[in-house]
Amino acid sequence: MRLPNAIEKFVELFSQLPSIGPRMARRLAFYFISTDKQTFTSLTQALSQLQTLDRCPRCFFIKETEQTYCSICADPKRDKATVAIVEKETSVLSIEQMGKFRGTYLILGNLKNGQLQKSQQRRLQRLKQIATEELGGAFKECIIATNPTTEGDVLAHIIKQELGTHAQRITRLGRGMPTGGDVEFADEETLGSAFEGRQ
C-alpha cells in the first residue's frame, strides 16, 4: 500500500530523529493529521520557534538569541572555576535536576570514529581560552561527566590529555552509573552518588 507523498516525506524526515523509527514516525503523522487545527498550528509554531534559539558561546548549551550567554553561564552565583564536561544537552538537564552541582558546563558532543571532530576541538579550545583569560590559566576542577560507555571512556581519556595543564584537578564521575548507561536517564540519587564518587 502506498501512502500519500506528504506522509512518506514526513516519515522519511522524522525517522532521522533520535529514538524515532519509521513506525513511530507514521504514528506521529497520523496523530498530526487527526488533531484539530488549533493544536496542529500550536505544534508547528513551537517547532518553528526552536529555530530562534542559539548556542551559548561559553558552554554550547541553548540560549535565547538576544542573550549573550545561557542562563547557567550568566548566573553570577555559579562557580566558574568548576566545569562539568558532558556529551549532550540532556545530560546538563539531568545534572541540573539533581540540584547539587553549582559549576558550569561544556557540551562536547559524542565521540565519532574514536577521535575528536573539528567542532569538538573548537569547543575544547574555547574551554582552554576561558581558563587562560578568566581563571589565570587553569580551572579549579574539570569533571568529566561522559557516559560510562566505551566511547565515553575514550572521550574521557582524550579530554584528560587535552586539558592536562588547564585544570588543577581532573575527575571523572564515579561508577554509580552502570557501564553502558546514559547520564540523561540516571535518577537523581544515582547521579548524585556518581558526582560524590568522582575520582
Image (spheres, rainbow, N blue to C red):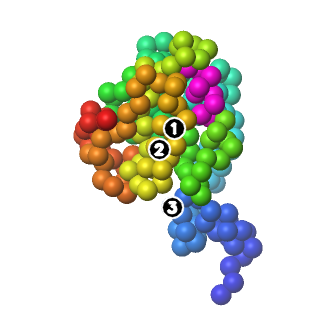
Quadrant of the rendered structure where residue 15 is?
bottom right
In the displayed structure, does residue 163 sit left or right of residue 43?
left
Q: CA distance from mark 3 to mark 2?
A: 28 Å
Mark 3 and 2 residues: CB-CB less than 8 Å, in contact?
Answer: no
Residue furthest to the right: 5
Mark 2 and 1 residues: CB-CB less than 8 Å, in contact?
Answer: yes
Count every numbered label the image shows and give the total.
3
Q: Give above or below for 106 relative to 133.
A: below
| Dominant SS in magenta | helix
Amino acid type at image mark 3: Ser
Q: CA distance from mark 1 to mark 3?
A: 33 Å
* Res 61 visible: no
- Disc 1: which residue: 161
What are the residue bounds of the magenta stretch?
Answer: 123-131
Pointer 3 local density, CA inside 10 Å: few below 14, some 14–19, many at least 20: few
Q: Position of residue 175 (x, y in %)?
A: 29, 46
Pointer 1 local density, CA inside 10 Å: few below 14, some 14–19, many at least 20: few
Amino acid type at image mark 1: Gln
